[in-house]
Amino acid sequence: MYFNRILKKINTYNTLLTLSVLGLLFSFSCTKELSSLDTVAKDAGGLQTSYIENGNAITLNGTVYHFTPDFIGVPISLEKGAGSADTVFATVEPALVESYNQLYQENNAAIPDGAFGASNNGAFAISSGATTPVDSLYATLLDGSQLKDSAMYLVPIKLKDKNGTALKSSIVFFKMRIHKINLGVLIDTIDAVQGVTPIPYKGGYFFDYFGADIADEYDFNIQLNAKFPQKDLKVSVEAYNDTASVNAFNAYDVPFPDGSFSISQKDYTIPAGALTASDNIQLKITNKSLFQSFTTYLLVVKLKQSSDTDNSVPVLGNGGIFYISFFTF
């Protein structure tokens, strides 16, 4: 009896000891986790700040190109002037996404390795005595293959000074929205040409100059659906003034009279980084007297992929076909 009472006390003591040890371990674990998150917050400057950017994954003729067209350059700052020529290195740290989520109760998706990078190839030179480099920091899109279109991703970038000089902030957070785009060219269908805004009609866009005086010239813009900084792109233009092409649109229309018009050129260039071609399509009316009153004339103009295959851009759906109709009283 006495022995059993002693045994019970020992078991109780062991249970309490085990619970105490577990409690200490849990407390240590929580303290360690909080300490780690506090360090991340401190290294990020103590602010819940993320800089918004846009990244484009553009497909052109089967090849995907990656660009970061919209960004905010963030200055890198040392706590004191560099004692000698120095370099700050910047690397993307995917593991910090989870730390940011815990700190600020967000639900940012994990990012794949290699999807994002730092500007300036991740190296920022600082002159002796200076506290900041010439170049600013921003996140860049490197590979969008595992990213979702229109999704926003948190991109943490960690900074480290080569000479060990302290930085004012050694972690910078960016958020980048991804846009996956199939690049194409089309006619500008927003701006009016000689007072007429086109309407979608029969697989193209219809400029209807009903009852209007025939002008000397009509200028039409060629544009991409996204800027493409990689290289200049080429597109061709073809006018169709035969009866079959016109009647396919409307059996009661007739082609423009022979010798009544000219198209400025056949081949057009869209410079790298530009949205529109360097030249407009110029339709010049060279002989107005050939157009008879109370007759509907129609000209069909189409954009075509250039024969310069290395620099060609496909036509975007029906956006590359437009119809020009004249009817005078």
Image (tube, rainbow, N blue to C red):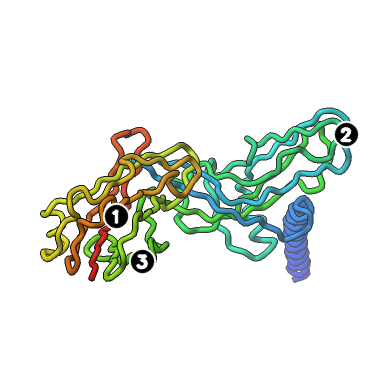
Q: Quadrant of residue 269?
A: top left
Q: Amino acid at mark 3?
A: Val
Query: Which quadrant of the rendered structure holds the C terminus?
Result: bottom left
Q: Above or below — where is 118 with respect to 44?
A: above
The numbered mark at residue 196 is: 3
Nearer to the camera, 81 or 228: 228
Q: What is the secondary structure assignment of the residue under circle 3?
A: loop
Residue 184 appears left or right of 26: left
Q: What is the secondary structure assignment of the residue under circle 2?
A: loop
Question: For the residues marked 2 and 1, what is the alpha-carbon distance in whole angstroms?
Answer: 57 Å
Q: Earlier in the sequence, mark 2 or mark 1?
A: 2
Residue 39 appears at what percent x and percent y? 77, 52
Q: Amino acid at mark 2?
A: Gly
Mark 1 against mark 3, which lies toward the viewer? Answer: 3
Residue 106 appears at what percent x and percent y? 62, 64
Question: For the residues marked 3 and 2, what is the alpha-carbon distance in whole angstroms?
Answer: 62 Å
Which residue is denoted by mark 2 in the rendering? Answer: 129
Question: For the residues marked 1 and 3, what is the alpha-carbon distance in whole angstroms?
Answer: 22 Å
Q: What is the secondary structure assignment of the residue under circle 1?
A: helix
Bin the neighbour count of mark 3 within 10 Å (Cα to Cα): few under 14, some 14-19, many 20 and up. Answer: some
Which residue is denoted by mark 1 in the rendering? Answer: 317
